[in-house]
Amino acid sequence: MAGKAPVTPDAESWAPYPDAGLDSDAAVDDPPAPAEDEDRLEPRAGREAVVGRSDAGLGPRYLRFLVGAVLLVGLFERSELLSQSGLYILVAALVVLTAVGLAIGFANAGADAGPEAGSPWAANHYLVPVMAVAVGGAVSVLVADWRMHLGGQLLMTAAIFSAGYVTLERFRAERRPGHDFLQDAALILVLLGAYAAILAGITSLPLRLLLLFVATCIAAYENLSRATPVAGRALVGGVIVGQVVTAIAFGLISYQFLDVTRLATILLVAWYVNRGMGYHMLEGSMSRGIFFEYVLGALVCVSLVATALLTH
């Protein structure tokens, strides 16, 4: 019986690609990369993103714990168990606690920040929170009403959280337009409390003027440091603003026709006008509309003084 001839498959029937014949070795030896390699990369990237977001959220969480601790400890400043010297020690301990806690949070948030975010160890990042703790302690010492004490502690801790949160967001490159307003509001709140505490609790005129100058200069420096990277310019601007506001305070205190509320308001508006003029001059953003805004603020100061004179 004759054997059957072996059946040889047609080249076009088994070639991996119809257009390639038996001589096409490239088509057989170099298959396309499997699609599952790309799929394996995507979950890894997703996990890295989740880990990054978790690490970045450590700063705000730590800031909330810090503010809560400062508030709880600050509420005990009116305790009868504390002497006058003990209260001073407690306020100093709160200043250290606030500064160290903010330093840890800023360092954690600014580890991967760009150079435009600034250094987490810059002094201007800590001025508003430290001033808030000092003002809260001054209110506790100088104001006997427990409601004023409670309100002062709540407002000062709000200022600590606002200023610290805005700085954390800047380090994380997530700053929004409303953050500038939030930081300015915290600074104005702290400065108004400082003016009220100094004018209500200090009777010596030289000490009053010295403390007013220090508080005004520090607040102006903190604000002007955001307009220029040169610390010397911000410091000189703060000194000039402090001198102007202190001179106005000296004239108004000497005549003794203003109560504490009106005097503190006038000094705050005077600080706002002089600080704003210096800020926009350093930033190079002065315009006619901004200039008239500060002229209006100066007119408000004059009207408050005139009203006090007429009702005196």
Image (tube, rainbow, N blue to C red):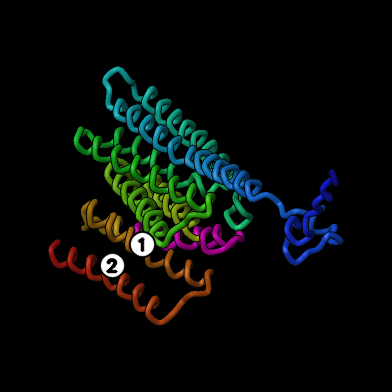
- The magenta region covers 225-249
Distance CA(mark 2)–CA(mark 1): 10 Å
Q: Position of residue 125 (x, y in %)?
A: 51, 48
Q: Is residue 208 above or below residue 80?
A: below
Q: Which mark is residue 248?
A: 1
The secondary structure that dominates the magenta segment is helix
SS at circle 1: helix
Which residue is more in the foreground, 20 or 229?
Answer: 20
Question: Dot 2: within a 10 Å radius of its alpha carbon, few (fewer than 14), some, or many (20 or more) residues?
Answer: many
Residue at 47% of width from left, 31% of height from top?
97
Q: Which residue is mark 2?
A: 301
Q: Quadrant of residue 108?
A: top right
Q: Image check: 285 left or right of 267?
A: right
Q: Position of residue 244 (x, y in %)?
A: 42, 63
Q: Position of residue 188 (x, y in %)?
A: 35, 54
Q: Amino acid at mark 2?
A: Cys
Residue at 63% of width from left, 46% of height from top?
36
> Residue 210: in sight, yes or no?
no
Question: Dot 1: within a 10 Å radius of its alpha carbon, few (fewer than 14), some, or many (20 or more) residues?
Answer: some
